[in-house]
Image: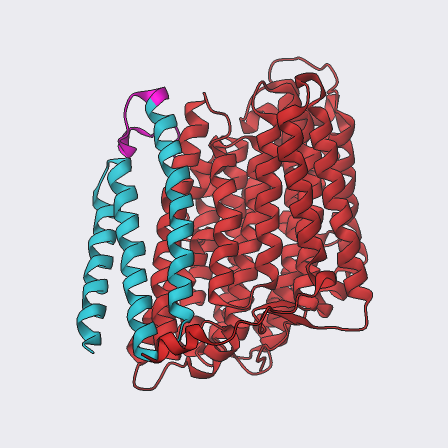
Chain colours: A cyan, B red
């Protein structure tokens, strides 16, 4: 099994996700970047589960998928809330408070 | 294909210790009741929901007490993945009492606003249930689920005032950074699982060190996991969400976030450090040292220039978090492991009582002044002497002035640093001591407003304090005074808090 390739893929996805969260100003794109990080975690877990021959990683990945769905539900709700009040979803425009 | 064989093995139902799970079950029952009643109850009778929430939390205290008195000191379930030990019982008690005080603080605030009351109580109880689970979780999966369980309702609570742009901003900032932090933490957890082939903390402990073939991966894993919780406890440089979220969220929610949510982060950090990474102290000790020194200093310096009282308390609570982290920076050294655990628990108990008290006074005063400025406290003593004295008491406790609780907490933290007898410990103690002095600058500023300045608008009508708020202020002030005058009370609970399976040097 080519464990390295999978781990490399996960690491690359993780970096893309982190870059996306840091560089993007659009709230929905930030949410998508976070999803990319979570998927890189899932790839990692499944690779290790196959490599080590245990089922813990599979179970963990299932939990992450379920919880990520709940997170995105709340996240999109919050983005919608902001859009209704401010007509924008750019996080740069969220600057009511300073200091 | 050995995985498939594992899957087809005979499934055996785990034995569930219902007595051990009783506090969680009571809270789970209470929150379902609140959710269902909210659908059917008449709008004018919604105040019932706050009563149900407060009684749920008090009822959940009963099994915590019976568990503490029972013969079995450690109950472990689901293959040691969920453990009820003394540490978790002490912290469950703290969370339930803090939750009760938050319910008392919020009830009048929630009733008087025209917002969604039923949801408020449901979300508050859900978040508390996650915290109760966090105290017992001894597995990466259950820690992750508990963390999300306590965070997701908290994101919604922060954005609870739907039409208020400040509240929206608070919720979005908290959500984005919180979810990002938990994603980074999960990447660390996946690496931990890869290296150790287990998600159980005690198994991870045996294989996670700073040396070996996978040293680089282990360092990355441990640092990422700690970063995830550093966001939760708003340690500098991961604190950027905290001031905005604390200022924008409704005041009782801010009290809840700055006390309960922060304590939950520390609980997870303590459990991980003592049960999962005891042999990897060379990785986390320097990291936590830097976090602690930065958190104390940056939090204090930024608090000095704040004009808004809630924002000032937000920075003050960041710097208090640095003091809680302080003993953990030497927790892996011989001789200071158990005293570090004790002082962290002690600090969390006392900080919870004091900070909730501060928010109680802020809520009471803002009922009259409708302002969040520090100057709105001007001349408070002249027209509301009780509130003035109480605020002075709480601020003095946060500053660590002797006869009050905060002093004992700081004393225990410094004692633990000195017991490590290391240069690192001494250096951090000096930084901590300097910061205690800086902190007095902004606490003293509020006290000066209360005692010496004139009332800003000359309006000296007395403040009407609702019954629930006075009860909350009573509980917190009695606790702050008792812990200071009789330190044995709090020390007793902190001494009890032993983590089952922890390796303590």
Question: Which quadrant of the view contains residue B208?
Answer: bottom left
Any part of residue B289 in sight: yes
For image coordinates 27% across by 59% down, the residue present is A40
Q: Position of residue B366 (x, y in %)?
A: 62, 24
In the figure, B324 relative to B159: above or below? below
Q: Is A97 in the magenta?
A: yes
In screen coordinates, is B37 left or right of B126? right
Quadrant, the N terminus of chain B: bottom left
Q: Position of residue B136 (x, y in %)?
A: 61, 63
Q: Position of residue B316 (x, y in %)?
A: 53, 45
Q: Is A46 in the magenta?
A: no
Q: Position of residue B256 (x, y in %)?
A: 59, 41
In screen coordinates, is B394 left or right of B13? right
For image coordinates 54% across by 40% down, the residue present is B313
In the figure, B231 relative to B160: above or below? below
The magenta segment: A84-99
Q: Main secondary structure of the magenta part?
A: loop
């Amino acid at each position: 099994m080519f464990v390295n390739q999978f781990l490399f893929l996960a690491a690359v996805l993780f970096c893309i996700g982190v870059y996306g969260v840091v560089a993007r100003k659009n709230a929905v794109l930030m949410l998508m970047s976070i999803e990319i990080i979570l998927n890189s975690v899932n790839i990692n877990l499944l690779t290790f589960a196959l490599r080590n021959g245990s089922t813990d990683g599979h179970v963990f990945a299932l939990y992450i998928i379920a919880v990520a769905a709940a997170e995105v539900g709340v996240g999109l709700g919050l983005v919608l809330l902001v859009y209704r009040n401010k007509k924008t979803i750019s996080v740069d425009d969220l600057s009511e408070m300073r200091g | 294909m050995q995985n498939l064989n594992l899957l087809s093995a005979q499934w055996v139902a785990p034995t569930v210790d219902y007595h051990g799970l009783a506090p969680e079950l009571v809270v789970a029952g209470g929150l379902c009741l609140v959710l269902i009643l909210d659908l059917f109850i008449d709008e004018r009778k919604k105040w019932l929901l706050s009563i149900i929430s407060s009684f749920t939390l008090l009822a959940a205290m009963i099994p915590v007490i019976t568990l503490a008195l029972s013969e079995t000191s450690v109950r472990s379930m689901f293959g040691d993945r969920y453990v009820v030990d003394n540490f978790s019982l002490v912290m469950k008690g703290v969370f339930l009492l803090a939750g009760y005080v938050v319910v008392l603080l919020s009830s009048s605030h929630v009733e008087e606003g025209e917002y969604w009351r039923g949801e408020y109580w449901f979300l508050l109880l859900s978040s508390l249930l996650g915290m109760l689970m966090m105290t017992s979780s001894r597995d990466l999966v259950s820690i992750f689920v508990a963390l999300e369980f306590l965070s997701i309702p908290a994101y919604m609570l922060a954005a609870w005032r739907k039409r208020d742009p400040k509240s929206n901003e608070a919720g979005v900032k908290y959500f984005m950074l919180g979810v990002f932090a938990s994603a980074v933490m999960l990447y660390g957890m996946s690496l931990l699982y890869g290296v150790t082939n287990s998600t159980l903390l005690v198994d991870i402990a045996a294989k996670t060190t700073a040396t070996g073939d996978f040293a680089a991966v282990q360092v990355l894993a441990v640092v990422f996991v700690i970063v995830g919780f550093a966001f939760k406890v708003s340690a500098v440089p991961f604190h950027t969400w905290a001031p905005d979220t604390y200022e924008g969220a409704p005041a009782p929610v801010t009290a809840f976030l700055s006390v309960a949510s922060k304590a939950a982060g520390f609980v997870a950090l303590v459990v991980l450090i003592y049960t999962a990474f005891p042999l990897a102290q060379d990785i986390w000790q320097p990291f936590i040292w830097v976090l602690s020194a930065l958190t104390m200093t940056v939090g204090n310096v930024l608090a000095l220039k704040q004009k808004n009282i809630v924002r000032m308390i937000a920075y003050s609570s960041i710097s208090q978090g640095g003091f809680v982290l302080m003993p953990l920076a030497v927790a892996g050294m011989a001789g200071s492991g158990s005293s570090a655990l004790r002082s962290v628990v002690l600090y969390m108990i006392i900080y919870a009582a004091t900070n909730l008290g501060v928010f109680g006074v802020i809520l009471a005063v803002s009922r009259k002044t409708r302002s969040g400025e520090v100057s709105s406290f001007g001349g408070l003593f002249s027209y509301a002497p009780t509130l003035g004295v109480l605020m002075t008491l709480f601020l003095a406790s946060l500053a660590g002035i002797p006869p009050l609780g905060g002093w004992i907490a700081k004393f225990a933290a410094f004692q633990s640093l000195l017991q490590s007898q290391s240069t690192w410990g001494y250096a951090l103690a000096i930084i901590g001591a300097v910061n205690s002095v800086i902190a007095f600058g902004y606490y003293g500023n509020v006290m000066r407003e209360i005692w010496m300045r004139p009332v800003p608008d000359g309006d000296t009508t007395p403040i009407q304090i609702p019954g629930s708020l006075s009860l909350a202020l009573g509980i917190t002030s009695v606790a702050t005074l008792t812990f200071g005058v009789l330190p044995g009370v709090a020390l007793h609970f902190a001494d009890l808090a032993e983590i089952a399976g922890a390796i303590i040097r």
